[in-house]
Amino acid sequence: MSPLRKVVGFGTVGKKFINEDLIWNDEKQFKRSLWKYKFEINPSYICEDWKRGIALPSMSLGVSRKLVDKETFVNMVKNADKTWNSGLFKEFFPK
């Protein structure tokens, strides 16, 4: 498990695809693909200093595999926008 439990960036899902390339450390260690369903991320913002990442809302750590509700997502983007002065909120929620 990663020692970093913060959000360090936001983006949108790009192309989805299936392949057997070894990308993650676990896959390289076992010398086989563990996750063949992959997708590209089109980054909207990446925090340059991971120490300034925003805290995850109180929920399970498997959140990366689940959708978060809209209210939680809005709050995360607002927090990131305030912390990073990023303009993310306007990008994700234009008028």
Image (cartoon, helix red, strand yellow):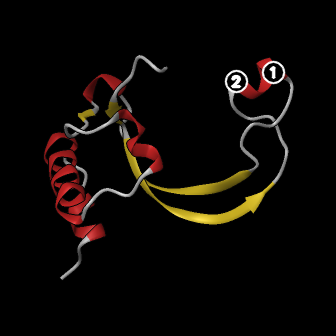
Q: Nearer the viewer, residue 94 or 63?
A: 63
User: Of helix, strand and loop, which one carries label 2?
Assistant: helix
- Left or right? Give the position of 64 relative to 94: right
Q: Which residue is drawn at 21% across and 62% down?
A: 89
- 10 Å neighbourhood of mark 2: few (<14), some, or many (≥20)? few
Q: Residue 90 in the image: x percent, y percent?
A: 22, 68
Q: Residue 60 in the image: x percent, y percent?
A: 32, 36
Q: Residue 64 in the image: x percent, y percent?
A: 44, 45
In three-dimensional space, the C-alpha distance between marks 1 and 2, rounded to whole angstroms, equals: 6 Å
Q: Quadrant of the C terminus?
A: bottom left
The answer to which image quadrant residue 53 occupies is: top left
The answer to which image quadrant residue 29 occupies is: top right
Q: Which residue is drawn at 36% across and 26% down?
A: 50
User: In the displayed structure, would residue 39 be above or below residue 91?
Assistant: above
Q: Which mark is residue 30?
A: 1
Q: Residue 32 in the image: x percent, y percent?
A: 85, 31
- 10 Å neighbourhood of mark 1: few (<14), some, or many (≥20)? few
Furthest residue toward bottom: 95
- Left or right? Give the position of 21 relative to 62: right
The residue type indicated by label 1 comes to Phe
Q: Which mark is residue 49?
A: none
Q: How many labels does the image show?
A: 2
User: In the displayed structure, would residue 84 be above or below residue 90?
Assistant: above
User: In the displayed structure, would residue 24 be above or below residue 69?
Assistant: above
Residue denoted by label 2:
26
- Left or right? Give the position of 81 relative to 40: left
Q: Which residue is drawn at 76% across and 48% down?
A: 36
Q: Which residue is drawn at 83% across and 52% down?
A: 19
Q: Which of 64 and 92 is in front in this view?
A: 64
The residue type indicated by label 2 comes to Asp
**Are the residues at dot 1 and dot 2 in contact (C-beta closer than 8 Å)?**
yes
User: Of helix, strand and loop, which one carries label 1?
Assistant: helix
